[in-house]
Image (tube, rainbow, N blue to C red):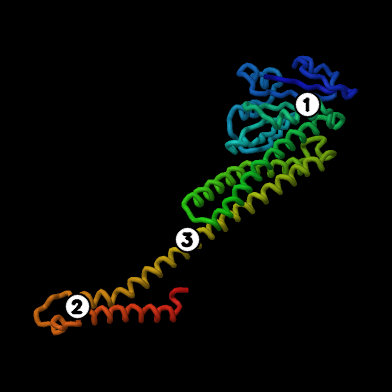
């Protein structure tokens, strides 16, 4: 589907203008959105707009790193949206011309829809032109990053409470799963941050300097997102280390208990082994009270060793 939006000199919004009429010169600026285009519609990037072949080729080669390319009269942006359920990156391309923008995406995009509605229905920034519309698209893309980041932050908090209450293998599985998701988000957000940095410091895009504070605000949001992700990665590392430390301490306690029990039973086993050899000439075997005497010695030995270990602090 291709939809068009044009703004007249009187700042009136016109919707669904035919492509061939957009270049009549009666519009101040316009926006064309290729929303899940068919093969025939996608060919219009070349046949109608005559964009550079390399830029058109990049639109069909998914999934690229966010970037900015400058051509003769068009600036080409590759940007990423984040799928809220899978956290996978979805490419959104944008062509910025002298008085227009063209967005191109193979996936349905709530971010583009919101940006479109903000311009078309709410009439925001019509007097600021197509540069402001470019900012709105970038701003909406970045705004949709926050829910995914905050969702992972809540999962980390839940896991942190779980670690304090119980110890099981699922905790470590959850930790590594979240760290993987954080890395996936970081691979999207950091290149977008670099892209906005280039936009803010570029002298090749006419009109950006006049509205630099808008793009700087988007860049600040990306810096904040990066800091949150890095902080959460550090937190997952701390939780992982705490989990391992708690398990090691628990294992040490178990091993110490087993060692004490084994040590106490070692002399008892020795005594039982000596009197279990059944040699014929063993004086104690003919003694009437020998059995009870040996049991008394074994009991006294066990109690004595227990008291000695306790004084040594082995049970603390």
Placement of 294 over or under 125, stated as above or below: below
> Can you identify the residue that label 1 sits on?
100
Say what secondary structure mark 2 lies in: helix
Please rate how many residues cluster around mark 2, counting C-alpha atoms within 10 Å: few if below 14, some from 14 to 19, many from 20. Answer: few
Q: Looking at the picture, how far across and down is residue 194, in whole percent?
A: 68, 44
Q: Closer to the camera, 171 or 279?
A: 279
Q: Residue at label 3?
A: 247
- Place of residue 73 in the rendered image (x, y in percent of width and height, measured from the top left): 75, 29
Give the residue pinned by disc 2.
274
Q: Which of the 4 quarters of the picture holds residue 184?
A: top right
**Dot 2 or dot 1, earlier in sequence:** 1
- Taking the spot 69% from the left edge, 34% from the top edge, the residue there is 77
Residue situated furthest right in the rendering: 10
The label nearer to you, 2 versus 1, is 2
Q: Secondary structure at mark 1?
A: strand
Q: Is residue 186 above or below residue 11?
A: below
Mark seen at residue 7: none
For the residues labelled 2 and 3, the Cα–Cα distance comes to 40 Å
Which residue is at 77% across, 36% downward? 135
Q: Earlier in the sequence, mark 2 or mark 3?
A: 3
Measure the alpha-carbon separation of dots 2 and 1: 99 Å
Q: Quadrant of residue 279?
A: bottom left
Q: Is residue 222 visible?
A: yes
Q: Is residue 72 visible?
A: no
Taking the spot 73% from the left edge, 36% from the top edge, the residue there is 140
Q: Can you say whether 139 is above or below 308 in the image?
A: above
């Amino acid at each position: 589907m291709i939809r068009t939006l044009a703004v007249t000199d009187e700042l009136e919004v016109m919707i669904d203008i035919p492509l061939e009429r957009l270049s009549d010169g009666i519009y101040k600026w316009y926006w064309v959105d290729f929303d899940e285009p068919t093969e025939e519609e996608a060919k219009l990037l070349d046949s109608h707009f005559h964009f550079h072949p390399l830029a058109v080729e990049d639109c069909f080669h998914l999934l690229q790193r966010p970037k900015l390319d400058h051509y003769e009269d068009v600036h080409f942006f590759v940007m990423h949206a984040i799928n809220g359920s899978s956290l996978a990156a979805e490419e959104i391309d944008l062509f910025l011309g002298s008085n227009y923008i063209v967005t191109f995406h193979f996936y349905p995009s709530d971010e583009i829809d919101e940006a479109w509605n903000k311009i078309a229905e709410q009439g925001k920034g019509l007097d600021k032109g197509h540069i402001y519309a470019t900012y709105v698209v970038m701003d909406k893309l970045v705004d949709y990053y926050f829910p995914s980041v905050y969702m992972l932050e809540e999962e980390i908090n839940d896991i942190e409470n779980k670690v304090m209450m119980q110890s099981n293998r699922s905790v470590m599985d959850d930790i590594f799963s979240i760290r993987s998701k954080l890395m996936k988000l970081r691979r999207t957000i950091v290149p977008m941050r670099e892209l906005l940095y280039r936009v803010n410091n570029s002298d090749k895009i006419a009109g950006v300097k006049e509205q630099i504070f808008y793009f700087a605000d988007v860049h600040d949001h990306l810096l904040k997102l990066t800091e949150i992700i890095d902080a959460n990665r550090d937190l997952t590392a701390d939780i992982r280390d705490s989990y391992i430390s708690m398990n090691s301490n628990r294992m040490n306690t178990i091993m110490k208990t087993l060692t004490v029990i084994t040590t106490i039973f070692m002399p008892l086993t020795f005594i039982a082994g000596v009197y279990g050899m059944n040699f014929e000439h063993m004086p104690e075997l003919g003694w009437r009270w020998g059995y009870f005497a040996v049991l008394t010695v074994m009991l006294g030995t066990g109690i004595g060793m227990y008291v000695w270990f306790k004084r040594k602090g082995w049970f603390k």
